Image (spheres, rainbow, N blue to C red):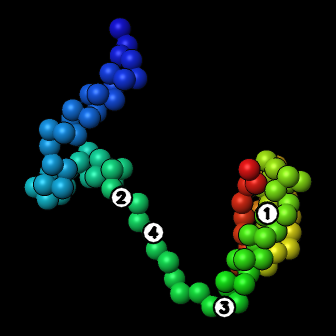
């Protein structure tokens, strides 16, 4: 008989509550399963790099384009650079095929 989703969640909470993952990683640094668990449960890391005024202007222009065109391109993949639409497509792969250069291009799906 299969467990309910709630039973699986409770089992995971119990398992996590029984041990200290950080200590397990230190004691068993070569244990692949422990390393995988530590990776999955690790806090999200956010990195940023310094931007120039030109880059910030481009980002603002892209955001403005998205606001103005959200309805027209809903559920479509778009490529936008400096507030100008370069291409749109029904899939990411189809979109990328249309582009020669993706430097400084916002590639996103519109929701």
**Point 26% across, 45% down: residue:** 33
In terms of secondary structure, where does tag 3 sit? helix
Disc 4 to disc 2, C-alpha distance = 10 Å
Please tell me whether mark 2 or mark 3 is closer to you in this view.
3
Disc 2 to disc 3, C-alpha distance = 31 Å
In terms of secondary structure, where does tag 2 sit? loop
Percent coordinates x, y for residue 26 in the rendering: 14, 59
Please tell me whether mark 1 or mark 2 is closer to you in this view.
1
Which residue carries the number 4 mark?
46
Which numbered dot is residue 43? 2
**Point 74% across, 81% down: residue:** 58
Q: Is residue 108 visible?
A: yes
Mark closer to the chain start, 4 or 3? 4
In terms of secondary structure, where does tag 4 sit? loop
In the image, taking residue 49 as reference, residue 65 lies left or right, namely right
Percent coordinates x, y for residue 8 in the rendering: 33, 25
Disc 4 to disc 3, C-alpha distance = 21 Å
Kindly give the residue lying farthest to the top in the view shown. 1
Which residue carries the number 3 mark?
53
Mark closer to the chain start, 2 or 3? 2
In the image, taking residue 50 as reference, residue 3 lies left or right, namely left
Which residue carries the number 1 mark?
67
Q: Are marks 1 and 4 in contact (CB under 8 Å)?
A: no
Is residue 30 positioned above or below 106 on the image?
above
Q: Are marks 3 and 1 in contact (CB under 8 Å)?
A: no
Q: Are marks 4 and 2 in contact (CB under 8 Å)?
A: no
Q: Are marks 1 and 2 in contact (CB under 8 Å)?
A: no
Please tell me whether mark 4 or mark 3 is closer to you in this view.
3
Mark closer to the chain start, 1 or 2? 2
């Amino acid at each position: 008989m299969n467990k309910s989703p709630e039973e699986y969640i409770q089992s995971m909470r119990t398992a996590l509550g029984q041990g200290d993952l950080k200590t397990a990683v230190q004691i068993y640094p070569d244990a692949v399963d422990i390393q995988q668990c530590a990776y999955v449960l690790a806090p999200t890391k956010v990195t940023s790099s310094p931007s120039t005024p030109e880059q910030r202007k481009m980002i603002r222009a892209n955001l403005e384009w998205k606001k103005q065109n959200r309805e027209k391109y809903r559920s479509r993949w778009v490529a936008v650079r400096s507030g100008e639409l370069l291409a749109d497509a029904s899939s990411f792969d189809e979109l990328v095929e249309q582009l020669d250069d993706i430097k400084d291009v916002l590639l996103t799906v519109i929701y």
